[in-house]
Every structure is written in structure tokens, then in C-alpha cells.
Amino acid sequence: MTADRVRAALAGAALALAGAAAAEDDYGGLPEGEGREWVYFSCQHCHSLRTVTNQRFSRRVWDEVLDWMVEEQGMVPLDPEIRAEILDYLAEALGAEG
Ligand code: HEC
């Protein structure tokens, strides 16, 4: 009885660890970088993260994309600090010249 319970608890813990590792690894294909989790949580309600990871834009264009998401696509305006982190991340991780 007790051994079964221990085994079940261990199996549960292993599954939880595997789940955490998967989320950690993948982030929907977002490249590593500071602020990644904000993009992960803010940008996939309406479209896949591929819509984001497929793009390479300059900081100026990403800035406009964020405004465009709010003004035309119905995104809830981001907290200014989080918006700044997201913009830094996008310009770094998915950047382009110009
Ligand atoms: C409320 C819904 C919503 C949220 C949240 C949202 N988007 Fe979008 N986004 C859209 C829609 C709708 C389109 C497609 C617009 C079109 O193609 O006409 C789109 C398109 C895009 C595109 C494609 C632009 C192109 O040139 O094809 C990019 C890049 C993008 N979104 C980035 C983001 C990022 C980054 C975030 C998070 C900060 C985000 N979106 C969050 C609705 C949203």
C-alpha cells in the first residue's frame, strides 16, 4: 500500500518535471531571450506564435506592429513596462536592419 502510494507520487512528480521542461524548452518556438515569456503569454490568444516567429522586423516596425495589434486587431493594451520588455525582446530576438 505505502510503496504504491510512494510510486504514484514519484510518477506524478516525474510527469510534472517533464511538463515543466517541455514548456521551458519550447515556448512555441520563440528564440531564447529576456522577455520571451511576455510574448509567449501575450501574443497567442488570436494567432499562433508562428505569426510572430516568422517575422523579422526592425525595432521601429515591431513598435508599429504592437500599436497595430492594439488599434486594429483588438489586443488589450499592454502595461507600458511589459510593452517595453516585449519590444526589446522582439527587436533582439526577431530583429532586422532598418
Ligand atoms: C486580440 C488579438 C491579437 C493579439 C492579442 C495579438 N495579435 Fe497579432 N494579429 C492579430 C490579427 C487578427 C492579425 C492578422 C491581421 C491581418 O493579417 O490582417 C495579427 C497579425 C500579426 C502579425 C503579422 C503581421 C504581418 O505583417 O503579417 C504579427 C507579426 C503579429 N500579429 C504580432 C503580434 C505580437 C508580437 C503580439 C503580442 C505582443 C500579437 N500579435 C498579439 C491579432 C492579435
Image (tube, grey):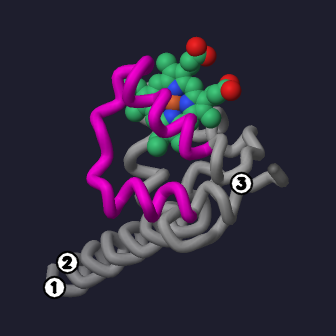
Q: Give the image quarter of residue 42.
A: top left
* Label 1 crowd bin: few (<14), some (14–19), many (20+), radius 10 Å: few
Determine which of the numbered discs, if any, sits on residue 41 in the image.
none
Q: Secondary structure at mark 1?
A: helix
The residue at the point 71 percent across, 54 percent down is: 94
Residue position marked by numbered label 3 in the rendering: 94
Disc 2 residue type? Arg
Q: Viewed as shown, does residue 86 lie left or right of 71?
A: right
Q: CA distance from mark 3 to mark 1?
A: 52 Å
Q: Residue farthest to the right? A: 97
Residue position marked by numbered label 1 in the rendering: 2
Circle nearer the N terminus (2, 3) = 2
Indicate whether 93 appears above or below 50: below
Q: Position of residue 51 (x, y in %)?
A: 64, 33
Q: CA distance from mark 2 to mark 3?
A: 47 Å
**Label pair 1/2, CB-CB below 8 angstroms:** yes
Which SS type dominates the magenta stretch?
helix
Indicate whether 92 appears above or below 61: below
The residue at the point 15 percent across, 79 percent down is: 1
Circle nearer the N terminus (3, 1) = 1
Disc 1 residue type? Thr
- Residue 48 visible from this viewpoint: no
Ligand 1: does it lie within 8 Å of the C-beta at label 2?
no
Indicate whether 8 appears above or below 71: below
Q: Which residues are magenta?
A: 62-88
